[in-house]
Amino acid sequence: MPKEGKNITENVNTPPGTATHVGDKKMENAKLTYTKYNKEKIDRKNIKDIDEFINDQETDKVKWLNITGLQNTELIENLCQALDIHPLVIEDIVNTGQAAKYEDYEQYLFLNTKSIVFNKEDELDTEQISFLLFKDQLISFQESESSIFSPLNKRLAEGTYIRKNKADDLLYGLLDTVVDHYFIVMEKIGDEIDLVEDELLSDPNKDVLHKIYTLKRELIFIQNTLWPMRNVLNTLSRNESDLIDERTNRYFQDVYDHAIQMIDLTETYRDISSGMLDTYLSSISNKTNDVMKILTIYSTIFIPLSFLAGVYGMNFKYFPELNWKYSYPVFWLVSIFITIMMIRFFKKKDWL
């Protein structure tokens, strides 16, 4: 099941601004990928020292440093301190239990977002992706190595419009990639709902009930992740910061619209899963009613037979029929006749 809190007690009672990694340790060593580009050229490489990024004096290119792995808090702290980043921002970067948020520090913008992924056990989980946007450079922080930014890297290599613009367009492209990844997750959830619906109609059982509850929890988990993202994107699309061009705001509005679409789809799927739960309960109730109906019919058939058996089982001394040699066969004929007539009556009423 999805984890709604990741070791959140690790950061309890520590001073504000303490850079303590909170969450699963997904990578032993941080990976630094440095990308520089303009409309004519792009250069991407892995670097070992943050000084190569900090001391780069080129001004005609957009610079993007992607840090994968948040366990090395010393490296992240040194980088942020060199760029005069607020200590509370550093704390939010390494605290993976943090909700999505947006903060404007005039010289830079900080965004904390969540990517929804399926882990190795094929269960829903989140990965935190944080961004620091400056005038001509962007720094992103990922929990673990993934292919979520591969489509954007491909577009950069092909020289699309992002190469012709500033770092705010790169931020738009990265956020758009994160939100688009929600569509992949929701498509898989939709396929799972279709399968559970088929199982529910063919054979409602406890396994189906477990799957329905799992779906409901997953959808609640997704919705709780999407709402803070919606607020971040809404604020970003109306932002008046000098670091974001007015033209780019329209693109952020488009990403915001995609997030709203995901929230609507999540609510639709939640309604469907609630309907499936009602259908399951109705099916179980119908099964119980069918069993009770059969038991009632059999009981009703045996009531007159039990009455006859009870009458002739009484210990009275004088029973005229007992001295008649045909009394036993007649008793069975009467019992069989009553049974047949009652069965015919039940079938006529469509109770059988």
Image (tube, rainbow, N blue to C red):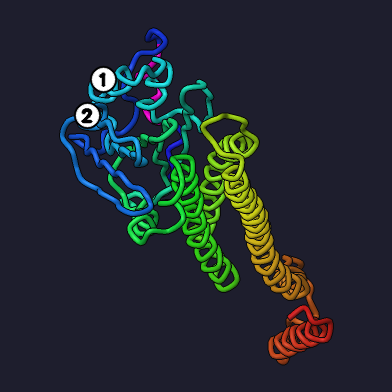
Q: Check disc 2 and report the residue beneath it.
A: 50
Q: Nearer the viewer, residue 94 or 325?
A: 94
Q: Quadrant of the C terminus?
A: bottom right
x then y, percent, for residue 151: 38, 58
| For residue 345, side relative to residue 6 (left or right) | right
Q: Check disc 1 and report the residue beneath it.
A: 78
Secondary structure state at the residue bearing disc 1: helix
State which tag comes first along the sequence, 2 or 1: 2
CA neighbours of label 2 inside 10 A, class few (<14), some (14 to 19), many (20+): some
Q: Amino acid at mark 2?
A: Ile
Q: Nearer the viewer, residue 133 or 69?
A: 133
The residue positioned 62% from the left and 56% from the top of the image is 269
**CB within 8 Å, label 2 to label 1:** yes
Give above or below for 316 relative to 61.
below
Q: Quadrant of residue 55?
A: top left
x then y, percent, for residue 335: 74, 83
| For residue 343, side relative to residue 239 (left or right) | right
Give above or below for 210 relative to 49.
below
Look at the image and give the residue range highlighted in magenta: 6-12
CA neighbours of label 1 inside 10 A, class few (<14), some (14 to 19), many (20+): some
Q: Amino acid at mark 1?
A: Asn
Secondary structure state at the residue bearing disc 2: loop
The residue positioned 47% from the left and 59% from the top of the image is 184
Residue sitting farthest toward the left:
48
Q: Nearer the viewer, residue 217 or 51?
A: 51
Q: Nearer the viewer, residue 39 or 218?
A: 39
